[in-house]
Image (cartoon, rainbow, N blue to C red):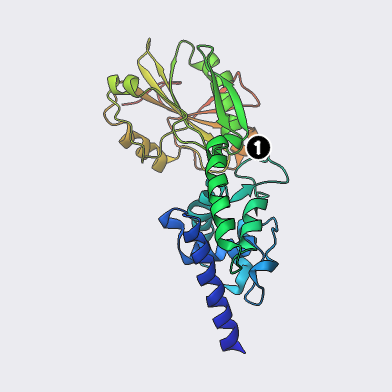
Amino acid sequence: MADRAETQAADRVSEALDILRALDVPQKQQNKRSALTLLALLGLTPQKDWIQAANPCLGINEMMKHFGKKYAPNTRETVRRFTVHQFVQTGLVLANPDNPARPVNSPDTCYQVTPALLEIVRAYGTASWNESLRNFVNSAEALRRLQPGERAIPLIPVRLPDGRQLDLTAGGQNRLVKKIVEEFCPRFTPGGVLVYVGDTGRKQRHLETDYLTKLGVVFDEHGKMPDVIVHLPEKHWLVLIEAVTSHGPINVKRQNELRGLFKGATAGLVFVTAFLTRRAMARYLSEIAWETEVWVAEAPSHIIHFNGERFLGPYE
C-alpha cells in the first residue's frame, strides 16, 4: 500500500508539472516545489483525480503541510517568494480573495486559485483538455495585460514636502514611514531634500539617484538602505532614518553597516531610529547605539538623543 501511495503521489506531481509547463509559467517555477504548491491550492491528494480539484483558500503554512511533505523551517519564505508570488503575478492565483485590502505582510494572508484555472485543471486528462488550455492561455494573456497583479495591492498615500503624493504599499513599516515623511521631516529636517523613501512592497519607491551621486553616494540596490534619507543642504547633513516595526533599531552593527554604505558621502551622517510608540521603543532600548537619535511617532514634537558630544548632528 505504501508503494502504491508513493507512486500515486509521484504521478500527481508529474502531472502538475505537465500543467505548469503547458501554462508556460516561468522556467524557475517549473519545479517540484511549485507542483506541490499547485496541488495544495487545488486541494488534491494522491488519491484524487483532477476532476475533483477544488479551490480552498490557504496560507503558506497550510500549503506546506499538504501532501505530507516535510519542509525545512526556512522554506516558507522560499515558497512565498519563488512560487506563490509568481502564481499571483501571472494571474493563476488570487491573493486575499476574502479581503483584498489586507496588508501584504499580514499573518492572515491567504491564496486561492482563480475560477478559470480551476476549470481548466478539471479538464486535464480529458478530451477537452487541449481546447480548454488554448482558450485559457489566450484569455489569460489579455487578463494579465489589463490587470497586472501588483496594481491590486492597496496603497498608503504620503504627501512629500514639495507637495507631490507618493503611494506606499499598505502594511509593514510603511504606516510609520508615512509619519516620518509627514511629521518628523517638517519638524526636525525643515528645508531638507527627501532623496530616498523605501517601501516594504516595492523597493526604491522614491529615489533621487543623481542627487545622491552629487553627494558622493553610490546607490547600491542590493544594499540594505535605511527607510528614509533626507539631505539638509544648509548644514550639509545626510539624515538616515530607520523605521522600526518588526526589525531592530540602529544598533552598533547597523550603524557600521550604514557607514559602509555611505562611506563616500561628502555630507555628515546623522542616524535616527523611528518607532510608532514608546512601548515599541522600550523593547529595543538596550540595543540602540550611542550617538544616534530616536523619534517616536506618538510624541512627534520630541526627539531623544542617545548621549554624545552634540544633539542631532553628525560625528567624525
Relative side of 115 to 140, left or right? right
**139 vs 204: above or below:** below
The answer to whether residue 10 is left or right of residue 252 is: right
Q: Is residue 166 above or below residue 153?
A: above
Q: Nearer the viewer, residue 169 or 7?
A: 7
| Disc 1, SS | helix
Question: What kind of residue is marked 1?
Answer: Arg
Where's residue 285, x and y in %? 55, 39
Circle 1 packing at 10 Å, graded few (<14), some (14-19), many (20+), is: few
Q: Give the quarter of the figure containing the C terminus.
A: top left
Q: Residue at x 58, y 26 (%)?
A: 178
Relative image position of residue 305 (x, y in whole percent) = 50, 26
Q: Is residue 215 visible?
A: yes
| Relative image position of residue 68 (x, y in whole percent) | 60, 74
Farthest right residue in view: 98
Nearer to us in this view, 236 or 80: 80
Q: Nearer the viewer, residue 219 or 51?
A: 51
Mark 1 highlights which residue? 279
Outermost residue to the bottom:
1
Residue 128 sits in which quadrant?
A: bottom right
- x then y, percent, for residue 149: 56, 40
- Tell me: residue 207, above or below residue 103: above
Quadrant into which the N terminus falls? bottom right
Q: Is residue 165 left or right of residue 259?
A: right
